[in-house]
Image: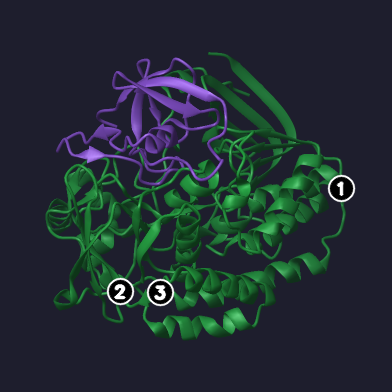
Amino acid sequence: MTNRILDADVGIVGAGPGGLAAATLLAREGLSVVVLDEGQRPGGQIFRQLPDGAHGHAAIAEPPSHRHGHRLLDAFQHAKVALQSGATVWDARPGRLWFEQGDASWLLRCRHIVLAPGAYDRCIPFPGWTLPGVMTAGALQVMVRGFGVVPGKRALVVGSGPLLLPTVTALLSAGVRVVAALEASSRWAALRALPAVLGNGARCRETFWYTRKLLAAGVRLRWGWTVFGCEGDGRVQRAVIGKVDRTGRPRRETAQAIEVDVVGAGFGLVPSIELGLQLGCDSHFVAARGGHCLRVDREQRTSVARVFAAGEICGIGGAEVAIAEGELAAAAVLSERKGLTVEPRLANKAVAERRAADAMLRAFAPLPGLHELAQPDTVICRCEDVTLQRARDAAALHGPSSRAIKLGCRAGMGPCQARICGPSLQALACQAPAMTMDKPVVQVPLKPVSTQTILEAPLG
Amino acid sequence: MNGRIGATGERAVVEFTFAGRSVQGRAGDTIAMALFAAGEQVLRHSSRDGAPRGVLCNMGICYECLVLVEGRTVRACTTLVRDGMRVERGGRP
């Protein structure tokens, strides 16, 4: 173990589109920038790249928007930015970010902080979702686009929202047969999303690209369908699928079984806001943007001085939003550091991208009826093996708050710190008619790190 | 064996063991992805039910893929394979 301290003008968390855009702009203006990223390579989840020295990139189909990713990464690599990969940030206060990297405990001291930690998949429990081979949609994309590994032979893709399409095309690139691709929202969602798609040239091209890929492979997206459960001996071998009503409630009479060996489930994304909460930033609940997200002003300032936020942490919006907000945050930091004015062009672009993303995501609003997929004996907190029945008992006995349920049955107390079960825990345990959840309670360490890291954390 | 897409596996071979069995990964693989390519999907058994568990999020969020590497509990999806690494199935998170 070694203690180390880094100093920089600006510390950025996350090397996805938002973090890359902000870092590049800040470094160009001569500020010293350190980017802390948990991944092994820059790009974040959306612009995943194969490991260094890998061949065969051409085998993996990329949608048109990924050209932005290459441009962003090129510019980032030419800018003078210190990237710390494999860095897990576990504590923060304004001007200070503590992180673990391998065996070492580090502190980054910086005057300004830009938070761009991204998002993760929203999980909705269903019977059999703990079986090996049942993964998030994001996991399958990482497997294919980040490592070139074949996920299986026969795949089921389920969930809701625009991210189902790249999951299907990733599987097709890997030569996997996509047996079924099920979108839980009704066809009305597609109609509602249509103006948002048609009103934006890039989104239009993107949707066309995906549609063509699916058609060529003979994969039909089924609207108003989802998975009722998965079965198998030690790993997933079968799935039961069926129709859902407009609220997502399963129509059991339509159930049918299919044989699959891999399942990707993606019911939208949840903003990763823990770091912002630890820093004391104000947040608000916006259902269509994935739940609790940080509040920012017109120039990406959070409620805490010298802490900025960009991209998914301000609400799910996608890569274009993250890039625009990352650039805007950088411009705002520069205005504070060097007195440069923030170009209205940057602020207008961020607003326009956000508006377009909101319109798209509103069409795929989370469906509360999907919480009826879990059965009383379905494990809903995977870390602590807590079943739905136990969570319901805890809510009945101790009250409907996430804290009461947690203390009553341990749901959310494991190492994922409720990132997986938290977003649906209250709706499930209280049989609430909507997708509600209390503001997450964060505690240090923000992610499990070794005791050594905490004991040897540099002070100052 | 799940295998690799096209030529993406044409990288230096990294030999390690999982639950005593010898596995060939590739340079730049995480433990989880090297094992998945080799057909090993069960990375641990859950703490109370003993049910098999494998990769869920593949991006360091869920802690479902915990394994033991020389006595240390690590996430298989964020830890890169090294030559001679000895990996065991993880237990309670």
Q: Which residue is mark 2?
A: A225
Judge whether residue A21 can be spotted in this image. no
Who's purple, chain-wise? B
Mark pair 2, 1: CA separation? 54 Å
Do the CB atoms of the residues marked 2 and 3 lie less than 8 Å apart? no
Q: Residue A332 lies in what quarter of the image? A: bottom right
| For discs 1 and 3, the disc positioned in front in the rendered view | 3
| Chain letter for mark 1 | A
Q: Which residue is mark 3?
A: A220
Judge whether residue B10 can be spotted in this image. yes
For badge 3, the amino acid type reads: Arg
- Residue A336 versus residue A226 in the image, above or below: above
- Where is residue B81 shown, x and y percent of the image? 47, 25
For badge 1, the amino acid type reads: Lys
- Where is residue A229 shown, x and y percent of the image? 21, 60
Mark pair 2, 3: CA separation? 12 Å
Is residue A426 toward the left or the right of residue A83 in the image?
Answer: left
- Where is residue A325 shown, x and y percent of the image? 68, 60
For badge 2, the amino acid type reads: Trp
* Residue sitting at x 71%, y 51%: A70
Question: What shade has chain A been given?
Answer: green
Q: Which residue is mark 1?
A: A338
Q: Quadrant of the C terminus of chain A?
A: top right
| Chain letter for mark 3 | A
